Image: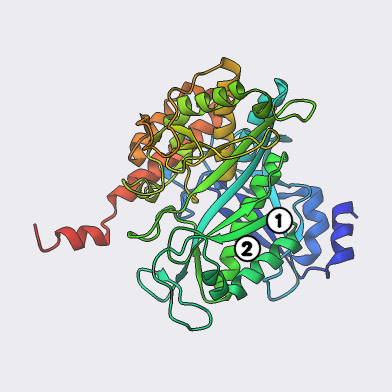
């Protein structure tokens, strides 16, 4: 028996069902349910599923543009268990195990799998003696699925809802205490390093924070697992948890912020030792920011978050202790000095987001890039380089980027961009309720 299975069975009942989970290029989980007695077989043989599964659109459809050589005929490939990912599913109605799989081909990790892309970027940093430490923060809304469109949920205790965002308030947390208790319990059972949940800047908007980690791929997977848990726990409570970047027109958007520091081979934070290295890292992020938006903002809705007057930065700039900039240096000491990347939405694939950010950091440090003028604390931020304001513009910048072809690999870029351009085209050919609301009777 595989040691991981043995350890699982020592602490959990034998599963009646197994959820195999595969994070696609959108960060959406796809997979199958297997009978509980197939666990050993999965660890030995994996599972055969379509290669195209990695690049379906947000609806789970396979774009025709993807089905060109070498994907004609939609061939299967082998998906192998990621060791260390086996855990119980506390919200399931029967004993259920959960395990993540990754794409392989001819016995090698698939180069176009976002997980492999991230591993490749990390290897480039480590080759130069740079060891990243990251912490992800994700925002989400709890919504009432019975409303159309969904509206913020009412308190579990049936009290009147608060008005306004109530940022950092404790009372709104108590209004959903049952939900939060379940989230904390699942995080503990599944070994997810959740540090806190707080009220964010929107009615029924919350933020989840993970602890800093140098195990970058595990950290990204923990973020995906926590999103999966939150959505399932909310559903069991009759609520809808949404990580859309802008689910409500008149409320704040939901972001995914990353805190990044870099350790040397002896475990010292090079940003704390030498401020110039931190500024070079920021310079690299500034230089690659526009091209990175193809993964930092992966959907049409992502761009609704970058509205004037909100907390979501809409141009490239940086500063210390300043929440209106895209790259912020929080108050910190020598050991925890870091940069906070504030551009991406909560709808992002964390593997690709981390790969994009760490690529920019590596590029900046290696080439000594100057970040340009600082946005000073207490003053309006500098008007930095514009970032793409619309989805197609961002996809063009990403797809033509020689920088990301180098760091992400041409195979990934080819498949991802084929799929995303098709998804963008399909989205803009649909007639939406806004077409009717604005134009049906007026034109």
Query: Quick check: 292 left or right of 411?
Result: left
426 relative to 151, above or below: above
Residue 381 in view (yes/no): yes
Quadrant for the C terminus, please: bottom left
Residue 205: image location, x then y, percent: 48, 62
166 relative to 356, above or below: below
| Residue that numbered label 2 is attached to | 229
Furthest toward the front, the residue is 378
Q: Residues within 10 Å of mark 1 (few under 14, many from 20)?
A: many
Quadrant for the N terminus, please: bottom right
Furthest toward the bottom, the residue is 158
Residue situated in front as seen by the camera: 246 or 160: 160
For mark 2, give the secondary structure. helix
Residue 78 in view (yes/no): no
Q: Residues within 10 Å of mark 2 (few under 14, many from 20)?
A: many
Q: Which mark is residue 264?
A: none
Residue 190: image location, x then y, percent: 74, 60
Q: Residue at x 34, y 38 (%)?
A: 392
Q: Tell whether label 2 touches label 1 (CB within 8 Å).
A: yes
Residue 42 sits in quarter? bottom right
Residue situated in front as seen by the camera: 205 or 394: 205
Q: Residue at x 68, y 41 (%)?
A: 217
Mark 1 to mark 2 CA distance (whole Å): 10 Å
Query: Quick check: 230 left or right of 12?
Result: left
- Viewer-side label of 1, 2: 1
128 relative to 387, above or below: above
| Residue that numbered label 1 is attached to | 192
Residue situated in front as seen by the camera: 334 or 229: 334
Furthest toward the left, the residue is 443
């Amino acid at each position: 028996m595989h040691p991981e299975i043995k350890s699982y069975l020592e602490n959990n009942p034998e599963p009646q069902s197994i959820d195999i989970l595969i994070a696609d290029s959108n960060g959406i989980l796809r997979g199958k349910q297997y009978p509980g007695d197939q666990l050993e077989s999965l660890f030995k043989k994996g599972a055969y599923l379509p290669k195209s599964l990695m690049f379906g659109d947000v609806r789970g459809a396979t774009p025709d543009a993807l089905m060109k050589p070498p994907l004609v005929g939609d061939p299967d490939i082998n998906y192998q268990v990621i060791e260390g990912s086996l855990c119980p599913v506390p919200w399931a109605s029967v004993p259920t195990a959960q395990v993540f799989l990754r794409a392989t081909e001819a016995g090698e990790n698939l180069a176009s799998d976002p997980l492999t892309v991230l591993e490749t970027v990390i290897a480039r940093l480590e080759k130069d003696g740079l060891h990243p430490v990251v912490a992800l923060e994700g925002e989400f809304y709890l919504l009432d699925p019975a409303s159309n469109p969904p509206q913020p949920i009412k308190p579990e205790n049936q009290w009147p809802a608060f008005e306004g965002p109530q940022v950092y308030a404790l009372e709104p947390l108590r209004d959903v205490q049952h939900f939060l208790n379940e989230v904390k319990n699942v995080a503990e059972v599944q070994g997810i390093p959740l540090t806190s949940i707080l009220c964010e800047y929107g009615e029924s908007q919350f933020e989840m924070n993970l602890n800093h980690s140098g195990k970058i791929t595990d950290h990204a997977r923990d973020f995906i697992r926590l999103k999966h848990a939150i959505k399932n726990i909310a559903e069991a409570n009759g609520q809808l948890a949404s990580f859309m970047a802008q689910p409500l027109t008149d409320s704040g958007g939901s972001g995914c912020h990353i805190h990044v520091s870099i350790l040397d081979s002896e475990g010292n934070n090079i940003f704390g030792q030498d401020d110039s290295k931190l500024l070079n890292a920021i310079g690299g992020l500034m230089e690659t920011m526009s091209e990175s938006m193809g993964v930092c903002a992966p959907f049409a809705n992502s761009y609704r978050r970058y509205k004037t007057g909100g907390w979501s930065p809409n141009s490239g700039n940086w500063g210390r202790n300043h929440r209106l900039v895209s790259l912020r240096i929080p108050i910190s000491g020598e050991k925890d000095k870091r940069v906070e990347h504030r551009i991406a939405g909560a709808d992002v694939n964390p593997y690709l987001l981390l790969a994009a950010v760490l690529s920019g950091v590596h590029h900046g440090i290696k080439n000594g890039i100057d970040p340009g003028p600082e946005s000073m604390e207490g003053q309006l931020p500098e008007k930095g380089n514009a970032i793409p304001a619309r989805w197609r513009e961002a996809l063009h910048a990403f797809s033509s980027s020689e920088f990301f072809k180098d760091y992400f690999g041409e195979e990934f870029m080819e498949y991802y961009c084929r799929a995303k351009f098709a998804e963008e085209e399909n989205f803009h050919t649909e007639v939406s309720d806004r077409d009717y609301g604005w134009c049906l009777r007026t034109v």
